[in-house]
Amino acid sequence: MNIHLLQILMLSLLFNCNETLPTKYGAGNKNFQYNGRYDLIENGAALISPGASVSINFSGNVCEIYLKAEKVPYNYVAFELDGKYLGRKKIESETTEPYVLEVSSKEKIHTLKIIKESEASNGFVLFSGIKVEKVMGYTQQRKYYIEYIGDSITCGAVSDDSVMPCDEGNYFDHENVYYSYGANMARALQADFMLSSVSGIGMYRNWNDENIEEPIMPQVYENLYLDTNHSKKYNFERKPNIVSICLGTNDLSNGDGIKPRLAFNKEKYTANYINFVKTVYNHYPNTQIVLLNSPMVGGENNILLLSCLKEVQSYFAENNNKSILLFEFDKTYTNGCLWHPSVEDHRQIAEKLTPFFKNILNTK
């Protein structure tokens, strides 16, 4: 054999031996950091709530993410790589598939975040692992943590018509959790966050149901999957600095205009709200609770809503020595699909709320 060819082959083998082949790391890896409502199950991690996420630091320029939607026809996640939003990705339900990301080789260590882009009712997204060169240790949890309790507004539902028009596709095709007001605020405040939010839900009744066929927020909040399965409870281990509550839009709504709808019951709404806040304090006795009026409700209904929220404030000030804060939106934001806030509206809402929340965190 030619001596030069032999040298080339030996050098090639040497370099190949020094390369680290990609390895698959399972969902239970101790270096993965989960946030939001999730469940470590037999074959992976179930990302349950909107915004539930897993964050991973890794080396190398190979990245394959193994995901599957629990329910047909599909689900969504968003990918963020090295701080850059890569958009929403449709996740199929038939089988676990590898979703490949293009990785720049400029950075030695990459940070990946996988975010669930749909609601608990859409079923969980199963994350079974990742194939990379090497998983690195992840940074500690952020100092601040905020929980947002709410309805479709808080979910970022029907806010995004950039992929398809509002009148096409499914309801959840237009959801954008990544650019919801809570997620925007968390990035601005450098805080971790969790969304405990469900479209159409209310404090004593829902958008088109008098709490006859569908559960209300007080009936699902303590359950991990935000449903009526009481056998799976959320653990409430991590205590938020702030709990933000934005519920009332659906209680005040007229429903679809076809199904019989009772007049708004101020006393029932306020009583349920007070009892719900007691539940929150039971799990987080030292948190700061902030009540929001609705970015979708104006006029006389807004005046009515604010009067209820102020009653809740007064109750806890007088009976529990708790200082609950109230933030009032001075306009409505309804430029998205189905008269919901658009992605741009969510940016503006976050811009309004962030200084208010920052001031609270600075006193903690």
Image (cartoon, grey):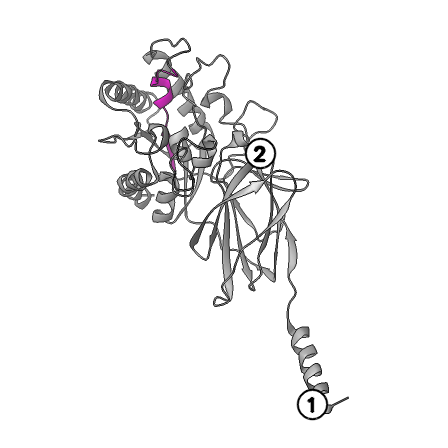
**Residue 248 part of the magenta-drawn span:** yes
Q: Is residue 172 left or right of residue 8?
A: left
For the residues labelled 2 and 1, the Cα–Cα distance comes to 58 Å
Image location (x, y in percent) of residue 101: 53, 55
Foreground residue among 280 and 122: 122
Q: Which residues are magenta?
A: 242-256
Image location (x, y in percent) of residue 339: 33, 28
Q: Is residue 181 left or right of residue 7?
A: left
Image location (x, y in percent) of residue 215: 49, 19
Q: Residues within 10 Å of mark 2 (few under 14, many from 20)?
A: few
- Against 104, is 93 above or below? above
Disc number placed over residue 4 in the picture, else none: 1
Disc number placed over residue 305 in the picture, else none: none
Residue at 55% x, 58% y is 137
User: In this figure, which residue is indicated by the disc labeled 2?
Assistant: 73
Q: Secondary structure at mark 2?
A: loop
**Residue 280 part of the magenta-drawn span:** no
Residue 201 sits in quarter: top left
Q: Secondary structure at mark 1?
A: helix
Judge whether residue 296 can be spotted in this image: yes
Q: Residues within 10 Å of mark 1 (few under 14, many from 20)?
A: few
Residue at 38% x, 38% y is 161
Residue 20 sits in quarter: bottom right
Amino acid of disc 2: Pro
